[in-house]
Image (tube, rainbow, N blue to C red):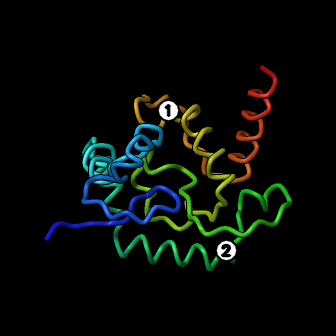
Amino acid sequence: MPRVHRCRAVGCHEMVEWPAIYCDKHKDLASKTEYRDRSHYNRVTRNRTVTKHEQYQFYRSKQWQGLRQRALARDHHLCQYCLTRGVVTPASTVDHIVPMEVDMGLATIAGNLATICKDCHRHKTAWEKSYYGTGQANSHTGLPEIHDLKRVVALIQQSEMAQRRG
């Protein structure tokens, strides 16, 4: 028996076979959406290098789950990046202050972890790409690691202000 699921078009209850996303009536929506096959993403993007594969496996480990829970409890589920600026924001993501891509040795160090909200995480990721050269298709800049959260927040703010100016 083939695997089936509902068409993803809003209000449509037509059943379609995997791997199709939409029924025949709504198949034109497939080209308009930016759907990405998860198995392709996991196979290609997450495992594109040995280092990326190790990072992906680490985030799936029990060790990471324990570290994450301890960091959330320590930070009282509050964004440490916002708190540095005097703003109280609830958060549920734990971030490496110095990215694992830069120094894998700091992956399990509790002092390198901080709770972060989605907005700060987006800004920090953009800053890491420009400062450290992290991310897909980038090369590492070789700049020194910054372990101080307050300094990272200040540099993120400087970077944002520079982008606004020009």
Estimate the x, y position of residue 146 in percent, counting from the top left.
60, 45
Corner quadrant of residue 128: top right
Q: Is residue 1 left or right of residue 97?
A: left
| Residue 77 circle label | 2
x and y percentages locating residue 151 in the rendered image: 72, 46
* x 27%, y 43%: residue: 44
User: In the rendered structure, which disc, 1 or 2, sits on the residue that comes first in sequence?
Assistant: 2
In front: 12, or 166?
A: 12
Q: Position of residue 113 (x, y in %)?
A: 56, 63
Q: Image check: 82 left or right of 53?
A: right
Q: What amino acid type should be assigned to the residue bearing mark 2?
A: His
What residue lies at 44% left-to-right and 58% top-to-bottom? Answer: 8
- 10 Å crowding of disc 2: few (<14), some (14-19), many (20+): many
Quadrant where the N terminus is found in the figure: bottom left
Up-down: is 124 above or below 138?
below
Figure disc tally: 2
Q: Nearer the viewer, residue 9 or 102?
A: 9
Name the quadrant of the C terminus. Answer: top right
User: Looking at the picture, how far across and down is residue 124, in whole percent?
Assistant: 63, 46
Residue appearing at x 68%, y 52% in the figure:
120
* Residue labelled with disc 1: 133
Horizontal arrangement in the rendering, residue 2 relative to residue 51 (left or right)? left
Amino acid type indicated by mark 1: Gly
